[in-house]
Amino acid sequence: MCKRKEESMTGLSETPIDYGDLFQILMGPIKARLMMTGIELRVFNVLTSFRTAEDVAREIGAHPENTRRFLDALVTIDLLEKQNGLYRNLPITQTFLVEGPPTYVGALFQMIETRSVDPLKDLNRLVKEGPAGESAERAFASQELWAELTRTSAAWAIGSMGQKVAEIISALPGFSDFRKMLDLGGGHGMFALYIVSRHPSMKGTVFDRTPVVEVAKEFIGKYGMGDRVGITAGDYMTDDIGQDYDLIWASSTLNFAKRDLDALIERIYRAVKPGGYFLSLQDGMTHEHTKPDTMLGHLADQLTTGVDFSLDQGAVADAALRCGFRWVRSRTIITPMGPMDMDIAHKLP
């Protein structure tokens, strides 16, 4: 009698977790492309009031039925509202994605897409082959490029972020007696404008490289603050930054001093008058240099150039204490682009 071969059986799969979070990551690029296409087609400019899909298609020169499908998708991701077949911007879209007002961030988002997202289409090659080398580093260091990026990035400081920073600084002990401040590596200078506007007489200076401070000059003129805020061109790593400041403010700029942070902080310490303050708003990497996800925006530059400019949490505070400041208070600031570290260093009288 032949024995029957036993068939192998596979048990049903069981797992305590599901792949929902992975699916949401996959959907992310679809949502981003919908928003960016809306910016590129200037759809949000058209929808400041309720309009039909046909109206929008006519305004942007597009296919009517596909325009309706596209607008429905923008409703799906909560950029538009739809009532009785009519479409209109939601408040967040109206505030930030309509061209004209200073709060418009469309150009900023396009710059981020170009610099931080598009290069990752080549991610496979970058991971396998490594950085592009010195030519990429030279392009990254171009002063003309930084002037262009500076003008575009001003949008992130306009409105809530500028207000938040100014509120924190104006609450510092002795603020009412401040006479002058320095916005170190200040770029567009918008933070200096917000800070100075909270004080009746304090003067401010925006210090950055020549093409960049010319951009700051534009914003100073635009807001009519030429009598309160001036500009100084130079390299803060090597040039004289002045002295006797009640406040030195540095936002997202100390990365460039990462290789010799103490040298810069020592110069800052000497430039702050006794009783004055040095404040830094900066990335602060945690969890073995993997969090927060805010810093993913810099991944493309790191992969392309081979240079990691990001700072670990506590690096600025530790340097300030090493270089003479006697106390430092640190806090996490929630920004529209994610959490950042604010370190407040006080030079005792």
Image: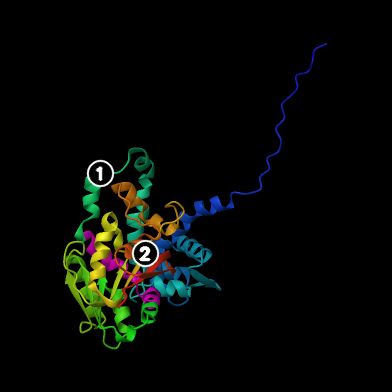
View extreme (bottom): residue: 200
Task: Please state which of residues 170 and 26 is positioned toward the viewer in this rendering.
Answer: 170
Q: Quadrant of the C terminus?
A: bottom left
Q: Which quadrant would residue 327 be assigned to in this image?
A: bottom left
Residue 133 marker? 1
Any part of residue 198 in sight = no
- Give the x, y percent position of residue 55: 43, 71
- Rendered residue at 39%/80% (across/down): 167
Q: Earlier in the sequence, mark 2 or mark 1?
A: 1
- Give the x, y percent position of residue 39: 38, 65
Magenta range is 145-165
Q: Quadrant of the N terminus?
A: top right
Pointer 2 residue: 317
| Type of amino acid under label 2 | Ala
Q: Give the SS element for disc 1.
A: loop
Most frequent secondary structure within the magenta stretch: helix
Q: Is residue 49 above or below residue 22?
A: below
Judge left or right: residue 346 versus residue 3: left
- 3D distance between C-alphas at marks 2 and 1: 32 Å
